[in-house]
Image: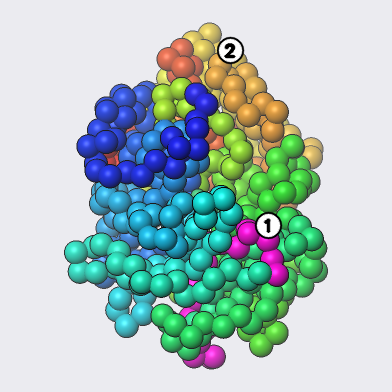
């Protein structure tokens, strides 16, 4: 379907308007059962992820009308355990002059026991000229976000129109709040613009650019910057765009991280080592760490399972997108370790035997250290499927999806490598209706991808170097 601008930016006036689409989307075989996904239409970035008074609040970028990046809302979901999620409805709608063409991504903070979210008001004038404002809203007792009347600040004129995705942090030593805004300079360089204030809701002033030592020229736009502290390390995450990176095929959108130290006097982040990919998969972007996590030695992260510019087979069914599983994050040296949320095992229904792959399944794979092959979503005769090959000589895993019936984004990449520093020991694999997530060697490497298996593609196969236990899982999200 070709979308006109009018169709993409249509304003949602009442829930009833999307009821027919809801009925269509709901019956798709690819609707996820234990991942957050769009109620209708399209979801992209996670937003405002925060723990508050016993509940996890999460929002996602949402376009109600179909599988298209049009007018964006914040849709709200909540959870007590990061496993079961309930739909709460629209949280931010583009209903002011400052956000007339979309409530874009942002983050949350809890201050004096209240939750505030900071987001980008994507304003466009009658000539479609964009002016991205940094805006704030407060979560009230009824769980509704109430916007402040005026933005905190307007975009800077000495940068391009690409200034968005406020990341808010409170810096104890300075007794100040800082906001980082992902930006693209006039020369096409990616960066983040830093603002600070000792009040949360006003008196914001521009401080300068964030400098990441050794990465003064890197990428063309840093979407969704995210800065957190885990234990005694600072972790900087962002999604660099308009650039190709090694081992990432033709893709020009990525999600990377650095472990290091943030110096707020010089606005410099000093990485311990080079950047790393946050995830090696085909579909992973705009990751956000939750605010207010009680245990200071761990983070909780969630990301968009998808990439800007990519297209997915469910476009035919007028919807697309999913978030990843939330993951517990630990720092080990200069690396992040990602684990499925503790307690996720409670979704296990029963242990399976044989080579049948139900649509919701967890596989526990042990490797004896030799080169080995695992094929998921094969046909009954064991042919085709998603190939996961481990080469023990090069210590390299290759994931190849080109033998699946439903192919997509072939021009970007269909096979990717995961270079390991050590032998392959184990993989935990989580399969939902249209996704697969691999946690390799206890979470040292992860691989996230959409897959859209057909009815015949419901078996798996592997060689003798792998030992596999499989568990059928149950559903945990609101429909
Ligand atoms: C990243 C992004 C953000 C923006 C949002 C709009 O995927 O482009 O930079 O705020 O999505 O939906």
The disc label shown at residue 383, or none: 2
Residue sitting nearer the eye, 25 or 155 = 155
* In front of the other: 8 or 194: 8
- Neighbour tally class for label 2: few under 14, some 14-19, many 20 plus, Cα within 10 Å: some
Q: Residue furthest top?
A: 381
Asked if disc 1 is less than 8 Å from ligand 1, the answer is yes
Q: Kindly report the distance in space between the C-alpha atoms of the residues bearing marks 2 and 1.
A: 42 Å
Residue 394, located in which quarter of the rendered image?
A: top right
Q: Position of residue 49 (x, y in %)?
A: 41, 61
> Which stretch is magenta?
158-176
In the rendered image, is residue 84 in sight?
no
**Does the stretch in magenta take in 175?**
yes
Q: Position of residue 26 (x, y in %)?
A: 30, 29
The residue depicted at 57 percent of the width and 50 percent of the height is 127
Quadrant showing the C terminus: top left
Residue 402's place in the image compared with 254, above or below, is above
Q: Is residue 322 magenta?
A: no
Q: Which residue: 48% across, 46% down?
A: 44
Q: Position of residue 235 (x, y in %)?
A: 60, 68
Q: Residue at x 50, y 30 (%)?
A: 3
Give the labeled residue for mark 1: 221
Within 10 Å of disc 1 (Cα), the crowding (few <14, some 14-19, many 20+) is many
* Secondary structure under the numbered disc 2 in the rendered image: loop
């Amino acid at each position: 379907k070709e979308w006109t601008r009018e169709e993409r930016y249509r304003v949602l006036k009442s829930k009833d308007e999307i009821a027919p689409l809801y009925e269509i989307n709901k019956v798709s075989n690819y609707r996820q059962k234990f991942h957050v996904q769009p109620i209708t239409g399209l979801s992209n970035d996670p937003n405002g992820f925060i723990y508050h008074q016993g509940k996890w609040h999460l929002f996602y970028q949402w376009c109600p009308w179909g599988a298209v990046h049009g007018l964006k809302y914040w849709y709200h979901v909540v959870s007590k355990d990061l496993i079961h999620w309930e739909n709460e409805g629209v949280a931010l709608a583009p209903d002011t002059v400052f956000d007339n063409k979309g409530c874009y991504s942002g983050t949350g903070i809890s201050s004096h026991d209240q939750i505030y979210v900071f987001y980008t008001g994507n304003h466009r004038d009658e000539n479609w000229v964009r002016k991205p404002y940094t805006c704030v809203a407060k979560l009230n007792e009824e769980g509704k976000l109430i916007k402040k009347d005026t933005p905190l600040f307007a975009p800077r004129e000495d940068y391009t129109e690409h200034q968005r995705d406020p990341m808010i942090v409170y810096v104890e030593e300075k007794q100040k709040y800082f906001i980082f805004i992902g930006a693209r300079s006039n020369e096409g360089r990616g960066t983040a613009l830093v603002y600070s204030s000792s009040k949360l809701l006003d008196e914001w002033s521009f401080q300068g650019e964030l400098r990441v030592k050794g990465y003064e020229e890197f990428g063309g736009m840093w979407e969704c910057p995210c800065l957190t502290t885990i234990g005694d390390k600072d972790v900087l995450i962002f999604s660099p765009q308009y650039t190709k990176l090694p081992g990432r095929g033709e893709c020009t959108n990525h999600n990377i991280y650095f472990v290091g130290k943030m110096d707020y006097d010089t606005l410099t982040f000093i990485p311990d080592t080079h950047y790393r990919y946050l995830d090696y998969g085909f579909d992973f972007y705009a990751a956000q760490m939750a605010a207010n996590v009680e245990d200071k030695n761990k983070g909780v992260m969630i990301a968009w399972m998808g990439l800007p510019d990519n297209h997915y087979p469910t476009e035919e069914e007028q919807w697309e997108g999913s978030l990843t599983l939330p993951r517990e994050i630990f720092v080990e040296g200069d690396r992040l370790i990602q684990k499925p949320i503790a307690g996720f095992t409670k979704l296990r229904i029963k242990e399976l035997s044989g080579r049948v792959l139900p649509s919701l399944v967890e596989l526990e794979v042990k490797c004896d250290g030799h080169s080995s092959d695992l094929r998921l979503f094969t046909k009954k005769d064991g042919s085709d499927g998603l190939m996961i090959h481990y080469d023990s000589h090069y210590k390299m895993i290759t994931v190849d999806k080109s033998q699946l019936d439903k192919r997509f984004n072939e021009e970007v990449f269909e096979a990717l490598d995961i270079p390991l520093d050590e032998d392959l020991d184990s993989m935990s694999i989580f399969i939902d209706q249209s996704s697969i997530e691999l946690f390799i060697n206890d979470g040292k490497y992860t691989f996230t991808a959409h897959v859209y298996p057909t009815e015949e593609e419901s078996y798996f196969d592997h060689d003798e170097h792998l030992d596999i236990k499989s568990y059928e899982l149950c559903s945990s999200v609101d429909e």
